[in-house]
Every structure is written in structure tokens, then in C-alpha cells.
Amino acid sequence: MMRSMKLIIFICYLLVASTGYFLRALNLRHLRKHGAEVPAGFAGAVDGELLARTSAYTFEQSRAGLCESVIDDIFIIVFLFSSLFGTYDRWLASLSGSFVTGGILFFLGLSLAGAVLDIPFSLYTTFSIENRYGFNTITPKLWLSDFIKSMLISVFLLVTMAGVALTIVQLSSQFWWFWVWGFFALVTLFLIYLSPYLIEPLFNKFEPLQEEGLAEEIRALMAKAGLSVSRVLQVDASRRSRHSNAYFTGIGRVKRIVLYDTLLVQMSHGEILAVLAHEVGHWKKGHIWKRLVFIEVAGLAIFYISFTLLTWGGLPKFMGLFHASFAAQTVILAFIGSLAAFPFTPLGNWLSRKHEREADRFACELTSQPETLATALIKLSRENLANLHPHPLYARFYYSHPPVVDRVRELRAEAREGK
């Protein structure tokens, strides 16, 4: 019975992994066929040389991602579907003898193993691919510094959150699902609120916007939208990469706008305002808080279901085990849950794309300049060598934003209707 359950889970995992590989291959085949075609509306902004460069960049990134996925899949199969999983669990239990300490060590070991596996791919992507296409500006010393800081922060958060959560489980055997959910929800809000002040400055230098007149234009735009922004900042993103972006951060009274210094070089004031108007659209349409509420409500349901299944005690059988620690069972549950959630990936991304279109329409209403947002998106795609020819099925499955060619076409249709 246990072997058949384990075999079913293994087959499900192979189906999920194979679907991902199939969609990736479909996307690259589509790019190989259409990559030299200049999309409608992009004439004059891109040419054959840029399209060839974009295709080559996409292929190299995809090959590196494919290699990483294969290594990850091999690691998961070897770890979960062999005796290694049970051996690892029993070894840590013998080391600690403590429910909380054993659980922390279990999660910490897996986290560190994942980080170590990621190192060669991060180095190759950063110092080979990104270098070759003119994006990388980070030095090995800064990369190492970022890596160490990220690891220390991750370890601190993992140890703290796992330690508190496991202590709650130990103290409240019947209602831990509710109290752990509440603890995680509070930590999430705490990090959203304090990250701009405690974590982000550890990696980047933030300073008041230097572009003359732009801060005033941004504040006027925010006032027109009925929003107040505490600070308008620029960040030294060019120390690490020539990729460009802009974003809102924080909540409540600590909302602030951050512009990459690379974006300031690439775009006009009007285009920057159009990009920010799109981000304002997410706030005004309630996308941020709706998503947060949905995550927390879904999280509460997931924690209760997890409590029920963990209390049941049958989870170890799915991996061919007679017994497993609480931490090991949560890993089994998370693994099976990820397989069950995979078919719903397109639904989540469809909703995200719907929100992006709503934010685009709001930006058009706020600025009355849909063409300016269209040119800003074209510049972003051109400067970042974004794939202009994703396969429609791949985009529907994985894209959280509508393909940029579709967005530009819709914005220009909006401009024609406005005229």
C-alpha cells in the first residue's frame, strides 16, 4: 500500500515537471520561429539586430533555467523518494532530542542545501550571461557581500519563525493552526512595514530624487490620484545591474516611491509618470489589500487543513515511511500541496493579468496619456531585452503580466478611442 501511494506521488511529480519542461520547449520553439518578426507597433523602436540579441538572451536564460530545474528535480527525487529523507529525519532527531530544536535544524538544513545548489547558477547567470549582454555591473566582492547578508537575514527569519511556530505547536496541540497563522500574518505585515527601513538599506543606497522637477511632478500626480507619499527616492540599482524598474514600497503612512537610477536615464519625465500611474492604479483599485486579504484567508484555510492532515498521521505513508517527525510531515504536506496547486497556476496568473490591465486603464485615465505609457513599456522591454514573442499557452500559464505587445496594442487602442 505504501509503495503504491509513493509511486502515485512520484508519477504526479513527473507529470508536473514534464508539463513545465513541455511549456518551456513550446515557448522557445515559438521564439525560434517568430523571433525575427518586428511586432506591430514596435517598428522604429526595435530592429532585426535587437530582436536577434533579445532571442539569444532569452535562449541563454532559458537554458540556464532549464539546467537549474533539472538539478533541482534530481535533488528532490533523490531526497524525497529514496531512503535519504527518512535517514535525514532520524539523524536530526537523534542529534537534538527536542521537538523545537529538531524542527529548526530540519528546515535550516534544507534551506542551506537549496542555497548551496543555487550558488553556481547565480554566479553563471550574473557573471556570464548578464555580463555578455551588458547588464551586469556587480563586482564579485559585492556579490559575495549580498549573498552573505541575504543568508544571514534568511537564517535569522527562518530560525525565529520556525522556532516560534514549533513552540506554539508544542504548547497548543488543538489550536496551533490558528495561532501559527496569526503569528505568520503579523510577521508579514511587520516585514512589509519595516523592510524599507531595516532590510532594503542593507543592500542599496536610497536618496532623495535628484532629477530636477521630477519629484514635484510625481507628488502632483499622486495628489491628483488622492494619495500622499512620504518620500520620492532613487536607488543605486546601477551598482548591480543595468536593468530598470520603479516600485512602491511600504504601507499606511510609510508609502514611498522608489525609482531605479537606470530608469531615470532611459525614460522621459512623462514616461516615468506613466509607469508610476500604473502602480498607483494597483493601490486605487485595491489590488494590494485584496491580494493580501486573499492570501491571509487562504492561509487560514491551509493551516486548518494542514492541522487536520498532520493530526491524521498518515502522511509518512505517502513517502513510504512508517514514522516521520512533525517537521518532516510538514515537508511532505507542502510537497503534495505544491503538486495539487500546480493546475491552478494559470488561474492565479489570469487574475494577476486582469489586475495589470485594470492598472493600465487607470493610468490612462489619470494621465490622459495612454501613448506615453505605451512608449514607456516599449522602452522597458527594449532595454531589458524582454521576449516579445512568448507562446500564448506559455504566457497564459506563467505570465503574471500580459505580454508587452498585447499591452501596447491595448493602450494604443485606448488612445485612439480617447481621440
Image (tube, rainbow, N blue to C red):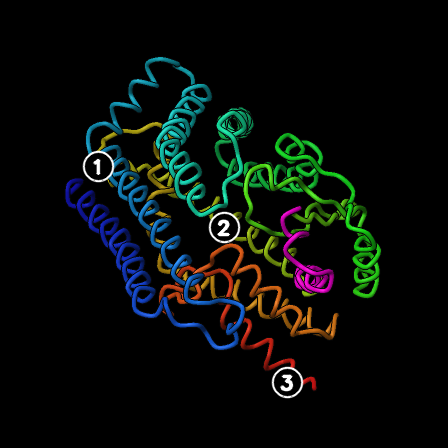
Give me the disc on residue 416: 3
Query: Residue 166: where, in percent of width, then height?
Result: 49, 28
Segment tinted magenta in the rendering: 261-283
- Residue type, label 3: Arg
Q: Residue at x 55, y 41 (%)?
A: 181
In the drawing, does residue 125 fall left or right of residue 268? left
Question: Earlier along the polypeptide chain: callout 2 or callout 1?
Answer: 1
- Relative depth, front residue between 384 and 3: 384
Q: In the displayed structure, does residue 281 sit left or right of residue 109?
A: right
**Residue bearing mark 2:** 301
* In magenta segment, residue 210: no
The quadrant in which residue 51 appears is bottom left
First reached walking from the N terminus: tag 1 or tag 3? 1
For the residue labelled by badge 3, is the local secondary structure a helix, a strand or a loop?
helix
Q: Which image quarter holds the N terminus?
A: top left
| Residue 269 highlighted magenta (yes or no) | yes
Q: Which residue is mark 1?
A: 81
| Residue 159 seen anywhere in this rendered image of the structure | no
Q: Earlier in the sequence, mark 3 or mark 2?
A: 2
| Residue 64 or residue 320, whichever sits in front | 64
Q: Nearer the viewer, residue 28 or 261?
A: 261
Indicate the position of residue 380 as horizontal and vertical percent values: 56, 59
Up-down relation of residue 15 to residue 165 (above or below):
below
The quarter of the displayed image where residue 285 is located: bottom right
